[in-house]
Amino acid sequence: MGKLDGKVAIVSGSGRGIGREIALKLATDGAAVVVNDLDAEPAKETVSVIEAAGGRATTCVGSVTDADFAERFVRTAEESFGGLDIIVNNAGYTWDSVIQKMGDDQWDAILDVHLKAPFRILRAAQPVLSAAAKRAREAGETVPCRKVVNISSIAGLGGNAGQANYAAAKAGITGLTKTLAKEWGRYNVTVNTVAFGLIKTRLTDTPADSDGTIDVQGREIKVGVSAALLDAMESAIPLGRTGTPAEAAGAVYLLCIPESDYVSGQTLICGGGFQI
């Protein structure tokens, strides 16, 4: 018996990287998972891994910034698995510049994916969560605890040079989390944030002087961190190393299991002991 048996989760940006590890972790413990990615193949591959291990999963491919995505994401959970219990807002990327070189399009793109998209997903989920709580009360049953975990970053807590857009969006996630923790307590929904520190992903594991880019809806975004900066960042981490995607997923998992049913409105820093 898994701690999440019978639960249904949606995890944005879960075809690759940290999101994939979150989807696998939740599925391993019994949750049915709706896997999302911009591209069909990574999403399908994550679903295949889950199903090969005996779990249940399906895909919802597309950009979280599309106007109709949030409703489609929530609807996929209901139609495929009969409900919605766990929401993880994970999708995102970085597009860095110092403020004097940052255009409106660069600002808007990052705010859209990291703040507006989670807002839309949570707005679309509200009628589902409210109705489920109402049905349970009318039947004289205890309302099950449902979970929201919004992904943030230490950049949203302490800022980071070259990331005015990303830091602002992630700081906004803190406000969104705290507000919904107060609004949704009546549905027995906990709403928390995990703020990641330095985690080893394709966005951080590419040398800054390489030609590494990612394609985001036809826009080529340069990725990578210089070796000197990585060394400096690691030296400030008490554990002395970057975290792994599996470790990042573990922090999210902690806020999805029953042991955290009375934890809400909080930010958990997953950063190896790094202090803001």
Image (spheres, rainbow, N blue to C red):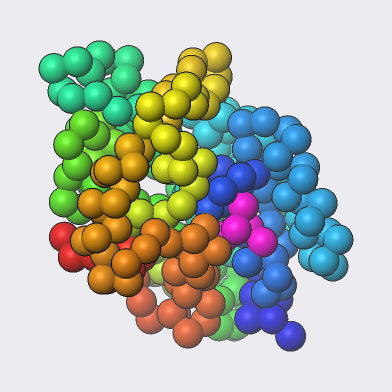
Measuring 48% from the left and 17% from the top, which residue is drawn there? Answer: 220
Q: Mainly helix, strand or loop, the magenta region?
A: helix
Measuring 55% from the left and 63% from the top, which residue is drawn there? Answer: 246
| Left or right placement of residue 148 versus residue 234 in this view | right
The magenta region covers 20-24
Horizontal and vertical percent for residue 177?
32, 56
Whether residue 164 is situated above or below residue 8 in the rendered picture: above
Let me know if residue 174 appears in the view: no
Say which quadrant the C terminus sits in.
Answer: bottom left
Q: Quadrant of residue 30?
A: bottom right
Q: Quadrant of residue 9?
A: bottom right
Q: How many badges with numbers are in the image?
A: 0
Let me know if residue 57 appears in the view: yes
Measuring 24% from the left and 41% from the top, which residue is drawn there? Answer: 167
Horizontal and vertical percent for residue 166?
29, 36
Horizontal and vertical percent for residue 172?
25, 44
